[in-house]
Amino acid sequence: MSTTTDSRLFTVALVGQPNVGKSVVMNLLTGAGAVVSNYPGTTVEITEGTIQGATGPIQVIDTPGIYSLHSDTPEQRVTQKVLLEGKVDLILNITNARTLARSLYLTLQLLDLEIPMIVILNQMDMAEEAGMSIDVQELSKRLGVPVVPMVASKGAGLATLKNRIFEVQMALSDEAVCPHCGRLDKGRLSRASTPSENDENLGALARFLGRPLRFSEDVESVLEILTTRIGEIIPSEGGKHGHHTARALAIHLLEHDSMDEELLSVYPELGPMIEQFQSEVASGHPPCKGCFRGCAFCPMSQDHPASLTCLERTDAAHDIALGVLRKGSLKTSTGYRQKLERLLDAPLTGLPLLGLTLWITFLGVIKFMEFAEHWVSVAATPLAEWFAAKAAEQTGLLSALLQSIPDGIILPFTVVMPAMIGIYTAMAILEDSGLLPRIAVMMDRLMSFFGLPGQSTIPLLLGFGCKAPAILGTRALPGKDQRFIISALLAITVPCAASLGIITGLGTTFNARLPVIYGSMAVVFVILGLSLGRTSRGVDRHLVLEIPPLRLPVVSNVISKTWMRLQGFFGHVLPLLVATSIGVQVLLELGVLSGLARLNPISLRWLGVGGESLVGVAVSAIQKYMGPMVLMNLPLSAREATIAGAMVSVSMPCLPVSILIGKEQGWGALAKIFGLALMLSLVVGVVLNAVLPVF
Amino acid sequence: MTLAEARPGDNLTVEPVAGQGVLRRLWDLGVLPGSTVKVLASHPFRGPVVIAADGIQVAIGRGLAAKVPVSRA
């Protein structure tokens, strides 16, 4: 065995349609904390983990959910890239037993890639509940690859799955890996699938290679022409061209009206080949006899409704599903879940019920925050008093420091932590139950005024937890315009749990008028949304969303998710808040901030707040929750705290979110958002100063 | 007729339509030419249409639904 093969990990990729439970299987296999939710599009980037295999460590990759290999979405490109890079030794294709026919569409596409594969039949319990039973043996026979039935949420089927993975790893351990490049030698694998092959390991692998779908004669004849041409122009190695078989590439061509940049960068030779093909057709000499007008990239197919391969694959998937479905004892009595679904999905009953759910959630979070604040304050009082007594004994800088410590430490626990726990728990319940996509449907009409599809409600609501994952979540939206609008709304107007907590603190400490602060955020949200909504163009402003079945949230999942997201509290929220508190006290004591008093004539006149308060606005560009924390340390009147609080709430995104927006949407988009934020923050200050009476 | 005009309870067949790029996102969810869908709900005030296609529920904005030609099955 060469050293190159040693250094290369056996790699397994989880591939499947959205919301079939890839992340649950990922967590089961690796124990990694992949976020699991009950709505499509939770995983927008690749998660990796390592497990101990039979002959060495195994790398496991969780990919974003895709409905098919030919849809043009950001998720699809991420997953396509993983498969294109040729690092994947084994595909774990996760399918949903309840919607088998649809799941099998992707399965059939994956079989074309001729990468060893195991099909996981997940959510068997849901299928049984719907009165379906599936002949697993028969399914495995028809696909030609092992099928492992699982109830991943309960851990059922894990042992079998692991054994299957180990089998492939052992079979691949030496011989089949190309000694030159360390890559899996697929040519030897395909040869091994003939019975004459003696090598036992390769024979074992053949069981995982499956049987790619044969299309109708028409399609196959075109595929043959294309595969021959591809074979001529792309050098092959062991039956594969790069990481694709010629057949997989030919099918890909038939299904795409434009070529992916990713694919063209791997196979630059394809560009000229397609052009030549198209010009032959255009000049009246179609290279394929008896053209069926079913190739998406062919100019003759302009009026064709769908690529014939797609339709035939859909039919084949249905045939297989029909062939393995044993409709056993179909339960005629519907459970409470179905009844509830019917109630929620009918607009007449669903809209009020979902509205009520949101209202109860909101009230619940507020009540929890008030309750926790009271009791944590009671518990922390002796500590605060001790520090206050010590501070009184000292003078100067030391006194300032001692004074700032209780504020810096206690406040995060009294207001910030309860807000984070409350909001994260509520969010986890909404996510896991399948209520979130239903809320998205309910909001669709309202969101359309902002030029946004209903599913953009999901990142908006997630933003009340933390905005960084919410910005990542905007990837599930297909349109660029829409992603910008939602990012701007999130960045400027939506308060994260931590800053929301401290803003409520302004109410307790300075008697600031919280309704005014919240109202400012809401008004700016609506105005900004309405004006940006006018820039929204194209078909992507319309809702297209799969609605998953309702599910009772699993308590352990809700707790672990809340706990995982709460790590940020100890990781950066608490230390940064303490630092802000101390920093402001020290700057005050040293007289640095008093320099800002020179701004007072202008800021008091126009904004009604002292120059020092503007530090809060500036600081929120580092961390949003540091902005109100600065204010907490200043001597403010109720009116000043209200105006400054509103200005800080409607302001620039924090540094982590800024970086994410820059990376996701370009630095130009970030500059626009910053400009808008500063402008809106000042406008809020000026307007409030003009309309708020003195109190 | 188009999907936007459908009423709850309708069983519909999706008709072929030119301009495949626009509707490709719907194919992925099982709303393909020739497939049968059942209308589950039609939200008021030109809100979304909810259909059952291929064993799953899909919500489609009214603007997009107006681009999907259908006939009664």
Image (cartoon, coloured by chain):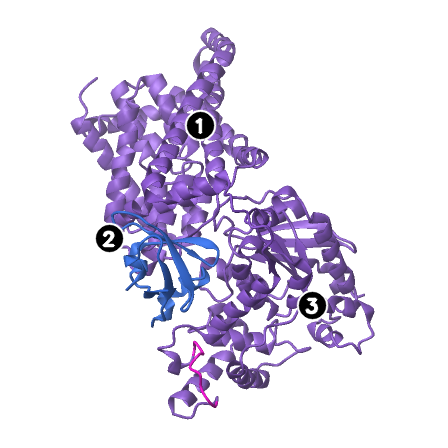
Is A501 above or below relative to A292? above
Magenta span includes A292: yes
Task: Give chain B's shade.
Answer: blue
Q: Residue A134 location in percent, x, y? A: 62, 56
The reply to whether residue A586 is in sight is: yes
| Sequence-earlier tag: 2 or 1 | 1
Numbered badge on residue A341 = none
On whether disc 2 and disc 3 are found on a single subunit, the reply is yes
Q: Few, some or many C-alpha atoms within 10 Å of disc 2 (few <14, some 14-19, many ≥20)?
A: few
Numbered badge on residue A534 = 2
Instruction: State the SS at label 1.
Output: helix
Q: Chain of mark 1?
A: A
Residue type beneath disc 2: Arg
Span highlighted in magenta in the image? A289-297
Numbered badge on residue A419 = 1
Circle 3 sits on which residue? A183
Q: Main secondary structure of the magenta part?
A: loop
